């Protein structure tokens, strides 16, 4: 398990937990933070592909 995959999994878990808490507490600010955290986890999904594509183009 790579460090990038661990970070992605941790951010996804934190985002889902924050989203659940925001619904329970009915707090819009926490909900927006959860959506932002999940968006970062989604962007991290494409980091490896972009790095691999750059390495293929360099050779």
Image: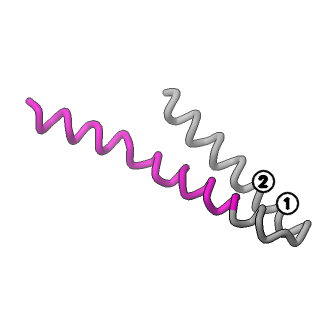
Look at the magenta stretch and give its main secondary structure: helix
Q: Are marks 2 and 1 in contact (CB under 8 Å)?
A: yes
Q: Residue furthest front?
A: 29
* Place of residue 38 in the rendered image (x, y in percent of width and height, measured from the top left): 60, 56
For the point 52% across and 36% down, the residue is 5
* Residue 15 relative to residue 40: left or right: right
* Residue 53 relative to residue 48: left or right: left
Residue at disc 1, secondary structure? helix
Q: Which residues are magenta?
A: 33-59
Disc 1 target residue: 21
* Residue 20 relative to residue 13: left or right: right
Quarter of the image for residue 26 reads: bottom right
From this view, report whether residue 46 is shown above or below residue 26.
above
User: 45 or 40, which lies in front?
Assistant: 40
Quarter of the image for residue 8 reads: top right
Disc 2 target residue: 17
Alpha carbon separation for disc pair 2 and 1? 6 Å
For the point 72% across and 47% down, the residue is 14
């Amino acid at each position: 398990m790579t460090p990038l995959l661990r970070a992605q999994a941790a951010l996804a878990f934190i985002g889902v937990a924050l989203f659940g808490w925001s619904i329970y507490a009915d707090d819009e600010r926490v909900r927006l933070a959860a959506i932002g955290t999940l968006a970062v986890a989604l962007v991290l999904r494409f980091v490896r592909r972009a790095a691999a594509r750059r390495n293929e183009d360099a050779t």
